[in-house]
Every structure is written in structure tokens, then in C-alpha cells.
Amino acid sequence: MELFSDKPGDEGLPGRERGLAMAAVMTMATMAVFDGSMVNIALPQIARALNISAGAAVWVSNGYLLSASMTLAIFAALASHIGFRSLFTAGLSVFTLASLGCALSSSLDVLIVMRVLQGIGAAATLSIGPAILRSVFPNRLLGRILGLNALIIATSTAIAPVLGGTILSAMSWQWLFAINIPLGVIAILLTLRVVPSNPAATKSPFDVSGAVLSAVALGALIMAADSFAHPGGHELMTALTYGLIAVIAGMAFVWRQRRAPKPLLPLGMFASSRFSLAALTSLASFVSQGITFVALPFLFQSVYGYSAFVSALLFTPWPLGIILAAPHAGRLADRYPAAIISTVGLCVFAVGLLLLAQLPEHAQVWDIGLRSFVCGLGFGCFQSPNNREMLSNASRENSGYASGVLAIMRTFGQCLGSAFVGVILSVFAAQNIAQEAQAVRLSLWVAVIATVLAIVISVSRLRKSAANLQNG
């Protein structure tokens, strides 16, 4: 297989060691995807087992998301101080031990604390996962390995609901966390063996002020999005308060980064228009994905009347499309301009969303699946080339930072998408199936608009690239 074959002048690790490093990174990515999707399915069972309300059980999910979001930028910066292997090993260890803690939890408080620790461990690994892949694979294979990474994540997304439902039908919810333990141990051993121990790139003091400000800004933004997803009088004021805190902390963070001797996030990276535009394109596209992933379950279950299990199966064509498109898109991105391929993918994605927004009142399963499949093909064609564009337009010493920005764009795009759906459902005060159907379809149209915005941003970078070629 070409991914693991060596050529003269190749950067990174020898072929066999590349495979083991890839296995470590992708095992962790798979666990993180499984953990989010399967735990959401188990929330009703957890609420019954711990004798708590559904609203309280939601914090089993929110605690993980909040802690991961607040620490993504911190860990992306910390990699340059302690090295990839040390940080990835520490993150894996925390995640694995916290999974054991979750499996042994007998109260909501303990479970939430363990989930917060899980989120911190996940952030430490996910923030630098793509950067590790860049460091161990030669640049000629970067698009392909990122495409394969997208394929693994899409596959995990496809089977996680079905696997979670199967486990819950035979065993208790604790087993959803227990399965992480052997996988985590294997990933730790592989990391210690093959992931480069690249020494710290800097001996400058860590930017503690920047770390605190980034955590406050990112955490407040997540809380604002969560409050907007459940709007009302009190919740709206709460959301606005969190939003104000996020704006103030964000402005203070930028001010600090411009003056810090060794900033938490080098703003100079964004001087590259190709990097900045790729990041904005990613944000807008994940807003679309976030809207769609929250809106469709309402459409499938409340409007069409399908069960939760059938609704999970109706999502399968989307990741299946990604599985088929992502590897080929990654290979093409190694030969042709990645921005062109990702823009084509966005156009296909927009067509798929348009088809979903125009689903008839009594849609057949095959019709829903086909339209979702088009979305998956488009997103799979977009994601890995766009990720390649981001990473390849950051210097190797800034790979960790670029990887963190990539993770932040994904997380916040999905959160903002979720908030949009919550606001629309509240504005429509959906009290019957007709109103809910109208709100869901409007949400899908908002997803189309966000994708069109992503296309506009993506096309602008094509123009800049063409202008640079003419000037050169």
C-alpha cells in the first residue's frame, strides 16, 4: 500500500512505523466519536438508572463538550512546549482512566466529573491528531492520510448509534464507557512506541493569561449556544450574558496574543489568506452540518413517525457517502489544488441540502437515504481537501496550532448550528406536527444558506490563488 511505502527524500517515519502511529491516532479518534454518539443514545437509560431528570442527564453530554471546547486551544499550544508524544500519551491516559471512572460511577456528580475529565483527555489528543499525522507522513501523502482519517471518523459515526443500541439492549450503560479501556491501553502502547518524541519547540514561559482567556471565551460561547438552543425569557438573558462574557474575553485574548512574547495562538498564522479562508470555510460548513444533524431527528421521528432506532439507520447514507468520497478526494488533493476539490464538494453538499429541504410530506425511506447520501458525498469531497489546505498552509512548527484551529472550527460550527435549530423551533413555538415540520424545513434552508456562504468564501480563495499565480 502506497501509504506505507518509502521513497527517497520522504519526510516523517518509515512505512511500518507510519502505520502504527496512524493506528494510535485513529483509535483515539474512533473512541471520541463513539463516546459522543453512543452516550447521547444512553441518556434516557442513565437518567432512569441514577434516578435523575432528563434535563440533569443532559449534562453528562454537555460536561464532555464544554471541557473539550474550553481546552482545545490550550493543548494545541502546549504541544510546542512538551512535544506531541508526551501530550498525546497524557491525553490518552486521562481519557482511558476517566472512562473507567465513568463505568464505575454510581451518582450523577461523579459521572459528570469523569465526563469532564474525559473531555479534557479528548481535547489533548484531538487538538494535535492531524498534526501528528502530518509529522509522521511525507507531504506527498498528506491528502490521502487526511482522507483516510475522515473515512475512519465517518465509519465510526455510521455504526456508533447501531452499536450503542446493540450494547444497551444486552448490557447496562456502563459498558459504553468500559469498551474504551482496552482500546485506550492499546493506543497508549502504540503511541509510546512509534509517535515521535519531538522535543519542545520552545522554552519560553507558557502563556497562562492567554490560556485562561481562551478557556473563558470558548466556554462562555458554548454556554451561550446551549442557552440559545432552549430559548425563553430567562434562558435568553442567560445566553446574552454568556455571549457578552465571550466577546469581552475574546477581545482580551486577541489583545494578549498581540503582546505576549510567546502567544498561546500565533496570530501570524492567519496572515496567510489561504489558511484563514480555509478556516472560515470549515466553520461555515460545520454550521450547516450541525443544523442538519439536529434538525433531521425531529423530521424523522416527530414528522415522519419513525422510531429512534430507524432514525439512526436513516443517518447511515450520510457517513456512507463520506466513506466513498473522502479517500478519493484526499488522493486528488495530493495532485490538484485542494481548494478546487473542496469547493466542488461544497457545491455537491449544497445540492444535497436543497434536496433534503424539499422532502415531501410523506417521503419514502429510499428517497430520504438518497438525498442524505448526496450530502455525504459532498461533505466527504470537501472535508479532507480543506483540512489539507489548512495544514499545508501552516509551517510545520505551527502544525499543532493549525490542528487546534481545525478542531475549534469543527466544534463551534456544530454548536452554532445546534443553537440555530433551537432558536427556530422556539420562534415557531412548535406545538403540533405541522408547525414542527415547518420549523425543521426552515432550519434546513438556513443550512443551505450557511453552505452557500462557505462556497462564497471558498471561491474567494480560488481567486486569491489565481492572483498569486499571476503575480508570481
Image: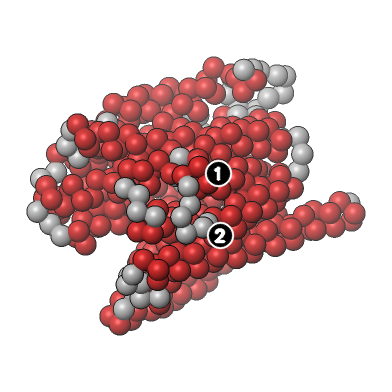
Residue 124, labelled with which disc? Answer: none
Q: Mark 2 points at which residue?
A: 358
Residue placed at 9% from the left, 54% from the top?
A: 51
Q: Is residue 28 left or right of residue 22?
A: left
Q: What is the three-letter code of the residue carrying label 1? A: Leu
Give the CA separation, mark 1 to mark 2: 13 Å
Horizontal and vertical percent for residue 302? 35, 59
Q: In which quarter of the image is the N terminus?
A: top right
Give the secondary structure at mark 2.
Answer: loop
The reply to whether callout 1 and callout 2 are in contact (CB within 8 Å) is: no
Q: In this view, does 248 lie to the left or right of 385?
A: left
Give the secondary structure at mark 1.
Answer: helix
Q: Which of marks 1 and 2 is nearer the N terminus?
A: 2
Horizontal and vertical percent for residue 330? 65, 36
Height in image: 393 above or below 19? below
The residue sitting at the front extreme is 362
Height in image: 230 above or below 180? below
Closer to the camera, 469 or 209? 469
Specify few, some or many for label 2: CA neighbours under 10 Å numbering under 14, 14-19, or 20 or more.
few
Q: What is the three-letter code of the residue carrying label 2? A: Gln
Residue placed at 17% from the left, 37% from the top?
A: 172
Q: Name the residue under label 1.
A: 370
Q: Is residue 420 visible?
A: no
Q: Is residue 49 visible?
A: yes
Horizontal and vertical percent for residue 373? 55, 43
Horizontal and vertical percent for residue 13? 58, 24
